[in-house]
Amino acid sequence: MDRRALEYTRAHYDKHSNQYASTAEALQARAQGPGAPLKKFHNTIKRQLINRFATGADSLLDFACGRGGDIWKWIDAGIPRVMGVDLSPGEIEEARKRFAEARAKRPDQPLDYQFVDSPSLGLEEWREPRQYDVVTCMFAIHYFFVSEAALKQFLHNVSINLKEGGYFIGTVPDGKRVNACIKHGKKFASPMLTIEAHWQGNPGCFGSPYICAIGDTVTGGEKGTQGSYEYLVYSNVLVGVAAQYGLRPVLDYGDPALAELFEMADAAKPLKHFQPRFPGSDKSLETASSLFAAFVFQKTSGTPAAPGASTVPQQAAQAGGSKREREDSAAAAAAAQQQQQRPAQRRRPGLMKPVGAEQQQQQEQQQQEQQDGGEELAAAEQQQAEPGDGGEQQQAEPGEGTAEQQSEDGDT
């Protein structure tokens, strides 16, 4: 992993970590800032993802936890044990402060939330004493696309700390959309979004850096840095590498309210792009939000499915997009339906029972086949990458709901 880029990123977030003297001051600034609609919308997506896939879970591990912007989401989802890890000591200090404030408001609720700083998630193994029901990484996995080795190390860390049947959920900027913003040059500039490419030649699957600055968020460049230093992420590369670590995409979230937050054409796709509507705001704020997409993976070699979800709707593969996108959607839907021949058995909502010996043998064979194909997938994507085709981004967060929720949501 590029340590110079890592140090830049850590310095960037340290400078954004403690901007206000109190939580109340932070809340007021967030509500009045021009980025407020984006922050609220992004937090709504995160809250509903957590509600859908982590409600009632015994434990959650949050990689790149930032300032603890999701603390109240975890509390409201009834999760008693959380470990948060981030590379920024300043943001970890703020997360501990926010948790102390939250725990004081819920003295009767057993909460064991710990926060630690470490720059090593993409450099070496991070193994917790126990596995977790859910692992999250919100607006941060793109940093690990600095190299293939860094991404593989990170996804290894996700997998070894996640229980079988558990969910890995997160949000990420889509590389193709980032590249689309700069297809007419190396820089895109607008009132609320600036993107500047820093790669040479055509972008690749890994190590294609760019600067992203979304106004009035933690990615902004107004605190002494140019902006957030990020790397392009391609959907099929992420899915292909994740498969090598037993992580398969959940295509149907089984929640119509959650589905309304994403573009309908993505119903059968691993990445589901945000569908923002910010009337009254500068149009570039919607452009910034629409760069992002949500993902959900399940650690299992069986059927990946959301709690209570139906099979992937066949009509989803026919929704909108280019011919290639429709073909990709149809292939994804067909693969999901083929995997769903044997329904998942639950030991608790959202978590699958351990597989039997016979199933395990079959699944290990499938995993090996996926692993063998992973390098081919990445190589194919490398050839397909075009200048106008990549992307990453941010870490937005503020809030909706009660003052308690907002004190945790106000992170960008």
Image (cartoon, helix red, strand yellow):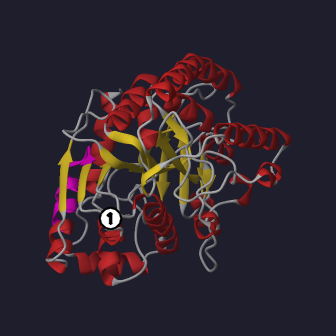
Q: Nearer the viewer, residue 151 or 3?
A: 151
Residue 11: % across, % down: 27, 46
Residue 33 in the image: above or below residue 359: below
| 93 within the magenta span | yes
Residue 239 appears left or right of 176: left
Other-residue count near label 1 (Cα within 10 Å), few / some / many at <14 / 14–19 / ≥20: many
Residue 245: % across, % down: 45, 29
Whether residue 63 can be seen here: no
Q: Nearer the viewer, residue 82 or 336?
A: 336
Q: Give the structural element (helix, strand or loop) at label 1.
A: helix
Task: Write down the region rendered in magenta.
Answer: 85-97
Residue 45: % across, % down: 51, 64
Amino acid type of the residue tagged 1 in the rendering: Trp
Residue at image x 65%, y 47%? 177
Residue, disc 1 = 74
Residue at image x 76%, y 53%? 316
What secondary structure is the stretch in magenta mostly built from? helix
| 13 within the magenta span | no
In the rendered image, the quadrant that contains the N terminus is top left
Residue at image x 63%, y 63%? 259
Residue 336 appears left or right of 169: right
Residue 25 in the image: above or below residue 146: below
Q: Residue furthest right?
A: 323
Whether residue 169 can be seen here: yes
Q: Nearer the viewer, residue 145 or 2?
A: 145
Residue 123 appears left or right of 101: right
Residue 128: image quadrant is: top left
Q: How many marks?
A: 1
Residue 389: image quadrant is: top right
Residue 234 appears left or right of 135: right
Residue 338 in the image: above or below residue 172: above
